[in-house]
Amino acid sequence: MPVKVPNNLPAIEVLQNENIFVMSQDRAAHQDIRPLKIGIINLMPTKITTETQLLRLLGNTPLQVEISLIHTASYRGTHTSADHLEDFYHTFQEVVDKDIRFDGLIITGAPVEKLDFDEVIYWQELTRIMDWAEKHVFSTLYICWAAQAGLYKHYGIPKYPLDKKCTGIFLHQLHHKTDPLVRGFDDIFLAPHSRYTEIRKEDVEKESHLMILAESDEAGVYLAASKDQRQVFITGHGEYDRETLKNEYFRDRDTMADPPLPRHYFPNDDTTLEPPMTWKSHAHLLFANWLNYYVYQETPFDLERI
């Protein structure tokens, strides 16, 4: 089944060329079915790229998904045109004013890890979003910095600075193998990380409402969730494209001296060679399981009941 997106969104053509089934609002309007309503709080500066990455994963399931793109009003980045935001995005306040509810919500990462949470320009707005989601969203998925922000906001779990950037493709071990979020996972799987801070296993384990579902010996906790399935925290970037870490590395090389080379990524650490795509199946399965088992199977048909 398709992911339903706004008419003329730039990601449509890219995804259709990859044989990903997407459906315009016009076509979806003629189907007698209630799609899952998924909101995306896109905090990334390269919003179009992030839209495409997430829609690629959300569109590869047997469920019809209706997407609402949301940006913060307290900060607008300079990498995305005002026309794109005007055409395809809502502000969070617009969502509140219209009393919109979602089956699921995704909050993306953001390149602000080195800042204390309360130093982030939109921190007050983001905490308001997280409070609002507890009563208006059935299950919320937090990615990378947003995972750290969510764990801090909801459970007081701190983030810690790293000596150097954690970047690369890392092996992860699976825990709680019977949890539906990791159904079908291999015992060991690969996933990308790209961040300057970390959360620590011992802090998460102190919180009785949380469970760690996957971790890496090198990169630490990767996947955690609340036991009621209402919150999922991913510290990495399963949505990344083949060359995302490459592009980040060359960007960093232009702005800093001797940035760390992404680990286990370039063949023989040769930056002239194409990196193999080794995490795609895990990423698709993670998002499909979240949509199916944490959202579709549990969310009320009438969203007013959340």
Image (cartoon, rainbow, N blue to C red):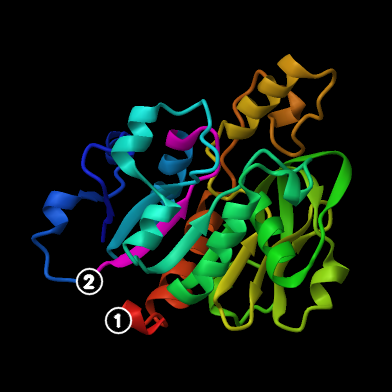
Residue 257: assigned label = none
Instruction: Point out the residue furthest to the front here.
Output: 97
Residue receiving disc 1: 301
**What amino acid is found at the position of numbered circle 2 in the picture?**
Arg
Location of residue 262 (image quadrant): top right
Instruction: Point out the residue furthest to the left here.
Output: 30
Marks counted in the figure total: 2
As for residue 236 lying within the magenta part, the answer is no
Location of residue 266 (image quadrant): top right
Q: Which secondary structure, mark 1?
A: loop
Question: Along the horizontal axis of the image, is 265 left or right of 302?
Answer: right
As for residue 43 lying within the magenta part, the answer is yes
Q: Which residue is painted at 59% across and 45% down in the image?
A: 278
Give x and y (percent) for residue 42: 49, 46
At label 1, counting other C-alpha atoms closer than 10 Å, the crowd grade (few under 14, some 14-19, many 20 or more) is few
Question: Along the horizontal axis of the image, is 17 left or right of 108?
Answer: left
Q: Name the quarter where the N terminus is drawn.
A: bottom left
Instruction: Depth check: give the residue in front, 301 or 294.
Output: 301
Camera sees residue 60: no
Camera sees residue 301: yes
Instruction: Depth check: give the residue in front, 165 or 173.
Output: 165
C-beta proximity under 8 Å, tags 2 and 1? yes
Instruction: Depth check: give the residue in front, 213 or 204.
Output: 204
Give x and y (percent) for residue 51: 42, 42
Q: Which residue is painted at 52% across and 38% down in the image?
A: 241
Q: Which residues are magenta?
A: 35-48
Q: Is residue 212 above or below residue 145?
A: below
Residue receiving disc 2: 34
Instruction: Depth check: give the residue in front, 105 or 77.
Output: 77
